[in-house]
Image (spheres, rainbow, N blue to C red):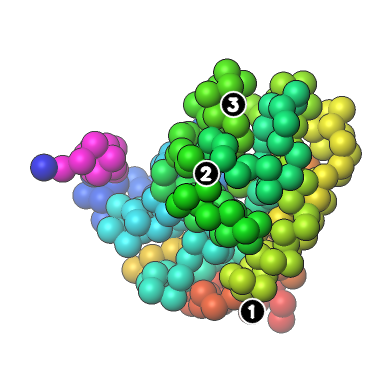
Amino acid sequence: MIDRRRFLALTTFGAAAAASGCSSDGGPVVRLASGEVGGFYHAFAQLLTAVAVESGGVRIEPVATSGSQENLERLADGEVDAALALSDSVTERHRVLALGRVYENYLQLAVRADGPIHRVADLRGTRVNLGAAGSGAAVTGERLLWAAGIDPTADVVLGHRPLLDAVAAVVADDVDALLWAGGVPTGVLDVPRRMRLVDLGELAAPMRDRFGYLYERVEIPADAYPGGPAVHTIGVANLLLAAPSLSEAAAEAIVDLLVTRADALVPAEAAGTQFLDTRSLIGTGFVPLHPGAAAVYRRSHG
């Protein structure tokens, strides 16, 4: 039997697939796996869709998902042509190419404003939501716990609710903490009125030591959440990825938008995160650039 997610993907995008990836005006159609409604990936995908309409060179069809892991699965299954993913969700077994390193997501461990949790070590014995099932936060969150000396299989009760459900559960005292990997501010977190962010800065070095170079210590500045204090956390780069089958024309059209329309691709949730520019776009680590993307960057850099 076909599962609900696959059924929805096939019925929603069957027409585009039947059109062999071409829109009615001849431009390529690119199905882009994004993220949860209300999150950074979803907002970025909507902006990219809008500037693509203005350019006329490519048409983006954004797909709402639970996040990085689901996006990579959909990319592997051929349900989408491109996807956003946290860099630490991508492994060398994934057969993907990069269009660019777009933004940096900030890990945000949110707890009730009046609650007793002040450090990650305080999570021992509590109920913790590590992102939706299929999200990048589910991967990064377990690594965060290990780096803090907490066994995620034994020392906490893990949950994987979508963001809106997790926020409601924390506020209702059904969950003690939630981890979100996204832009700053993420309005539904309601910081500092009902929730506050736990400082994660001390874990950046242990994360790098144990799991690699992808993690860096960053600051969420004061008033990034209006009235909220400055806290340190861990940044993880986002990659815009493509299936190897994506045409060079489509890849070039998308990357040209990243290079030339960067000012129109900054979500409201981007106050603290960000480096969408040609200097950082090519920093995709071990994930090779799509040939179409490489061609645009060569032209841009000379």
Task: Calculate the distance from the C-alpha at mark 2 to the C-alpha at mark 1.
Answer: 48 Å
Whether residue 79 sits left or right of residue 162 in the image: it is left
Residue at image coords 63%, 42%: 123
Task: Calculate the distance from the C-alpha at mark 2 to the C-alpha at mark 3.
Answer: 15 Å
Whether residue 114 sits left or right of residue 144 in the image: it is right
Q: Residue under label 3, please give it.
A: 170
Badge 2 marks a residue whose secondary structure is loop
Q: Amino acid at mark 1?
A: Arg
Task: Calculate the distance from the C-alpha at mark 3 to the C-alpha at mark 1.
Answer: 48 Å
Q: Residue under label 1, please give it.
A: 298
Badge 1 marks a residue whose secondary structure is helix
* Residue ranking furthest to the top: 172
Residue at image coords 82%, 37%: 224
On screen, residue 223 above or below 247:
above
Q: Residue under label 2, please give it.
A: 156
Q: Which residues are magenta?
A: 2-13
Residue 130 is inside the magenta segment: no
Q: Nearer the viewer, residue 122 or 92?
A: 122
- Tally of numbered tags: 3
**Front: mark 2 or 1:** 2
Residue 243 point in image, percent of width and height: 38, 65
